[in-house]
Structures are given as C-alpha cells and as structure tokens.
Amino acid sequence: MATQDSTESLMAKAQALIEKVQRDLESGDQQIRNQGLDPQKVRTTLQDQLTPQASAEARAAFEADMAAVDQEVGEERARASFATPARSSGGPRRPRSMI
C-alpha cells in the first residue's frame, strides 16, 4: 500500500509541476502581449535565429535529461517490485467439504 501512496504522491507532484509550468508559460506569453507582440511570432523568430549547433546542444541536453528520467523510473520500479511481496486478496481459504 505504501507503494501506491508514493505513486499517487509522485503523480500529484508531477501534475502540480506541469500546471506550474503551464502557468509560467502563460505568464511569459502575457508579458510578450503586454509589449504589443504576438507570442507565436516571437517564438518563430527566436527559433529561426537558433544556430544548428545550439539546437543540437539543446537536443542533446534534453535527450540526456530524458534518459536520466527513464533510468530513475526504471530503478524506482525495480525497488518497488522488491519492496513488498504480492499479497493474496483475502485470508486463507477454508478447506472444501468432502462428500
């Protein structure tokens, strides 16, 4: 049961982080709008100015982060599988009556 609680807690933290990032992105878009600019056009312009080398570095850093996350998830899954043995759904069965 502790594994389920920790999983739910982890999922709640992840969802809260996603919502925070979305709020931060919207806040940034609002600041761009306050300056009289279109956020989508600003992103397009900045992306066009990004050099192939910088883009490759960013992609490599992203892939390294994702690999680290995948490894951590795998390790946690392995720890969780060994942490608690599988339990039966109920108590011991009653013996069958013989005829």
Image (tube, grey):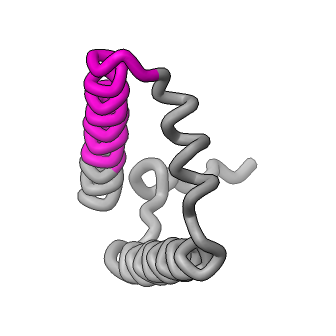
Q: Quadrant of residue 6?
A: bottom left
Q: Quadrant of residue 45?
A: top right
Q: Quadrant of the N terminus?
A: bottom left
Residue at (34% x, 26% y) in the render: 32
Residue 68 or 12: which is nearer the viewer? 68
**Magenta: main secondary structure:** helix
Residue 28 part of the magenta-drawn span? yes
Q: Quadrant of residue 34?
A: top left
In the picture as drawn, the residue positioned furthest to the right comes out as: 99
Residue at (69% x, 53% y) in the render: 98
Residue 84 or 59: which is nearer the viewer? 59
Residue 34 or 27: which is nearer the viewer? 34
Looking at the image, residue 59 lies above or below residue 8: below
- Residue 69 percent across, percent down from the top left: 44, 73
Looking at the image, residue 57 lies above or below residue 49: below
- Residue 36 percent across, percent down from the top left: 36, 16
